[in-house]
């Protein structure tokens, strides 16, 4: 029904920057909140940053002041600008979107396939 395609991952030295993108496509009536997640110490995906349909944002404490999430509703795309990257930011980053699909009564969560970010010293 809905596909999320991420791009922009790669390798960078500590202190560098990367920009992730996630484009949504499919039978989308409305895109609700969109966000980025990465595995935490327990390997469960943890929130990195989230933006709702009105533009309100939420960040993990570990990335506040370094990462910025934004969205382009016309392009159905969410971005994550990552600055001052640290070794501990190394992870697979997953895009998430809550989507109201045509003819469905409520929003449903979808995940992208993940994009690797590697930060080296």
Image (cartoon, helix red, strand yellow):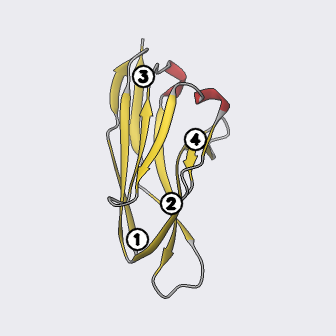
Q: Residue at x 59, y 85 (%)?
A: 105
Which label lies toward us, 4 or 1? Answer: 1
Q: Where is mark 4, residue-wise?
A: 39
Helix, strand or loop at mark 1: strand
Q: Residues within 10 Å of mark 4 (few under 14, many from 20)?
A: some
Q: Where is mark 3, residue-wise?
A: 119
Image quarter hosting the C terminus? top left
Marks 3/4 in contact by CB < 8 Å: the verdict is no
Query: Mark 2 or mark 4, which is nearer the start of the sequence?
Result: 4
Question: Given the current orientation, which residue lies at the most extreme front position?
Answer: 54
Helix, strand or loop at mark 2: strand
Query: Mark 3 or mark 2, which is nearer the start of the sequence?
Result: 2
Query: For residue 2, which numbered disc appears in the image?
Result: 1
Quarter-of-image position of residue 113 = bottom left
The x, y position of residue 89, in whole percent, is 51, 27
Alpha carbon of mark 1 to alpha carbon of mark 2: how far? 10 Å
């Amino acid at each position: 029904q809905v596909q999320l395609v991420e791009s922009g991952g790669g390798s960078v030295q500590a202190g560098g920057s990367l920009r992730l993108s996630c484009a949504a496509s499919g039978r989308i009536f409305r895109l609700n909140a969109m966000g980025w997640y990465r595995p935490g110490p327990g390997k469960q995906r943890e929130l990195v940053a989230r933006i709702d349909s009105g533009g309100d944002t939420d960040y993990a404490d570990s990335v506040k002041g370094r990462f910025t999430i934004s969205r382009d509703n016309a392009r159905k795309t969410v971005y994550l600008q990552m600055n001052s990257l640290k070794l501990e930011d190394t992870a697979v980053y997953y895009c998430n979107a809550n989507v109201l699909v045509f003819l469905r009564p409520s929003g449903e969560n979808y995940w992208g396939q993940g994009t690797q970010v590697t930060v080296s010293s």
